[in-house]
């Protein structure tokens, strides 16, 4: 059974860079054309897609976050990672990694449990 | 347009049928997917494509599409169906994923 697990600091200072990693187990990140995704959810609010990446490094980003987001993949570690720069309190959220049903797809059928990142000094 | 619009809250009597809708221009080109989210949990995919249910999702959940509107129907709502429901799809360009604002379903 495919599993995804987010990891990274739970507290980031304003203006600094948020860094998270998603580790995939139960399957290889590079054996298909999936575009692995990052999605976030501020406390008490809705879901927001951040971006997606293929095993070859091709990316799609949310236009509203594109200037601050970098997503990259480490196939040897079966991981993909998120960096969000110049964070503010508005970036406080539960961050999820997820696998789409196929290719670059909006249907995400496997999700990590999520990790809360708080932006605060 | 890149927005998907959902009603913020809907209620249904136990055992009755409820429809949750999602509107957006992108839905004219792309199917919506639907997710159920309970407090403290990750979203769970319940409907995708034309009207497909992942393994383990009860058949009381169904989906439909018409023009720029996608609908999630729960036929015979159960107490455990009380949750937030989100639709998502691609935007007009097809290059971005968008989520609706979510609908809080209360089972009375």
Image (spheres, rainbow, N blue to C red):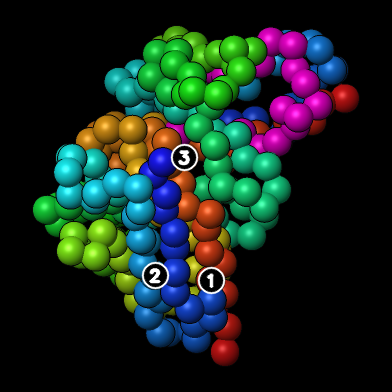
- Do marks 3 and 2 both belong to one polypeptide chain? no
Which residue is under mark 2?
A20
Region of the chain picked out in magenta, as a range: B71-88
**Disc number lying in front (3 or 1):** 1
Residue pushed farthest right?
A: B108
Few, some or many C-alpha atoms within 10 Å of disc 3 (few <14, some 14-19, many ≥20)? Answer: many
Tags 3 and 2 touching, CB below 8 Å: no
Query: To which chain does the residue with label 2 belong?
Result: A
Q: Is residue B69 visible?
A: no
Q: Position of residue B75 (x, y in %)?
A: 69, 10
Q: Residue at x 33, y 71 (%)?
A: A83
Tags 1 and 2 touching, CB below 8 Å: yes
Residue at disc 3, secondary structure: strand
Q: Which mark is residue B77?
A: none
Which residue is under mark 3?
B99
Reply above or below: B7 against A73.
Answer: above
- Do marks 1 and 2 both belong to one polypeptide chain? yes
Q: Position of residue A12 (x, y in %)?
A: 49, 82
Reply above or below: B35 against B65.
Answer: below
Query: To which chain does the residue with label 1 belong?
Result: A
Q: Is residue B12 visible?
A: yes
Which residue is under mark 1?
A117
Residue B99 falls left or right of residue B41: left
């Amino acid at each position: 059974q495919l599993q995804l697990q987010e990891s990274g600091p739970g507290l980031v200072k304003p203006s600094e860079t948020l860094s998270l990693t998603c580790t995939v187990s139960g399957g290889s990140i590079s054996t298909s054309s999936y575009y692995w995704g990052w999605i976030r959810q501020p406390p008490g609010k809705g879901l927001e897609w951040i971006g997606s990446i293929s095993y070859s490094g091709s990316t799609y980003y949310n236009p509203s976050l594109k200037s601050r987001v970098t997503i990259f993949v480490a196939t040897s570690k079966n991981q993909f990672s998120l960096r969000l720069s110049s964070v503010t309190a508005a970036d406080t959220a539960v961050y999820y990694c997820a696998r789409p049903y196929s290719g670059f797809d909006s249907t995400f059928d496997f999700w990590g449990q999520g990790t809360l990142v708080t932006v605060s000094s | 347009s890149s927005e998907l619009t959902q009603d913020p809250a809907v209620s249904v009597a136990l055992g009755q049928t409820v429809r949750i809708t999602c509107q957006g221009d992108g839905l004219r080109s792309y199917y919506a997917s639907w997710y159920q989210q309970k407090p403290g949990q990750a979203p769970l995919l319940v409907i995708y494509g034309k009207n497909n249910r992942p393994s383990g999702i009860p058949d009381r959940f169904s989906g439909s599409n018409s023009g720029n509107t996608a609908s999630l129907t729960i036929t015979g709502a159960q107490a455990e169906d009380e949750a937030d429901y989100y639709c998502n799809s691609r935007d007009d360009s097809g290059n971005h994923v968008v989520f609706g604002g979510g609908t809080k379903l209360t089972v009375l």
